[in-house]
Image (tube, grey):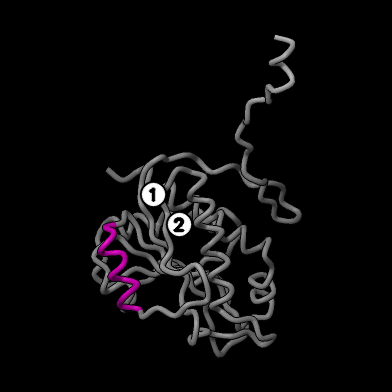
Amino acid sequence: ESQIRPYLRKAWTPQPPPTVIRPGTGPMPPLARVDHGRVLIDPGHGGKDPGTTSAAGLREKTVVLDVGIKLWRDLGESGVKATMTRGNDTFIERDERAAMSNRQKVDLFVAVHADSAERTSASGFTVYISRNAGPRSHAAAAAIERAMRSAGFTSQGIRQAGYRVLVKNDMPAVLIELGYLSNPAEASKLGDSGERGIYARAIADGVVHYLKNIP
């Protein structure tokens, strides 16, 4: 025993994920575990396509990639098998993004974007589904919209649109416009890595709730 003891190591214990805190509100509760479900995260734009840009030069493709990676990590910690259409500054055609979802037969496709408007006062996030969306897309959109509102974000509601990544998708699919880069206050939030973590955690909370409640 005396010879073996120096070589023994303390058993490794998984550490809890880092606490997510929004300044002034305290920590957000940990995500629930779901241990099933496949989700494809699609950070919009990328590569030659920067998306919209704030007055300070913040590019949509950069914002949504960071949120997408944080969302991927959060979902993984909850037991969800999450993949991404792009994990770096790469351009992918919109039809190919939808095709990836169809090939993988995911339980949910989540596209992440940031909005822009002529009025700099326009604000809030919006969750989009296809005009011919099925009940699961409606359920996912409702769960994500509710979770983001609960996290303190201003909602513009759930809307239907003809975005190709939604229309060409045979799987349940949503597209989230996080906020307006044309709005200086929202652009400032979206430019902060910690705040982007709050967006990602709220979306993950909605996705997990949806996955726990689908048959």
Q: Does 109 appear above or below 183?
A: above
**Residue under the image location 62 percent in, 39 percent down:** 16
| Residue 28 image point, x, y percent | 63, 47
Q: What element carries label 1?
A: helix
Residue lying furthest top: 1
Q: Nearer the viewer, residue 109 or 181?
A: 109
| Residue 146 image point, x, y percent | 48, 55
**Residue under the image location 50 percent in, 82 percent down:** 47
In the picture, the quarter occupied by the C terminus is top left
Where does label 2 land, which residue? 144
Q: Residue 157 carries which label?
A: none
Which quarter of the picture shows residue 105? Answer: bottom left
The tag earlier along the polypeptide, 1 or 2, is 2
Which quarter of the picture shows residue 106? Answer: bottom left
The dominant secondary structure in magenta is: helix
Q: Which mark is residue 210?
A: 1
Q: What element carries label 2?
A: helix
Which quarter of the picture shows residue 141? Answer: bottom left
Q: Which amino acid does label 2 sit on?
A: Ile
**Residue under the image location 26 percent in, 64 percent down:** 102
Q: Which of 85 and 142 is in front in this view?
A: 85
Q: Are marks 1 and 2 in contact (CB under 8 Å)?
A: yes
Q: How crowded is mark 2: few (under 14 residues within 10 Å), some or many (20 or more)?
A: many
Q: Does 106 appear above or below 56?
A: above
| Residue 112 image point, x, y percent | 47, 69
| Magenta residue span | 94-105
Q: Nearer the viewer, residue 41 or 212?
A: 41
**Residue under the image location 38 percent in, 60 percent down:** 40
Q: Does 36 appear above or below 139?
A: above
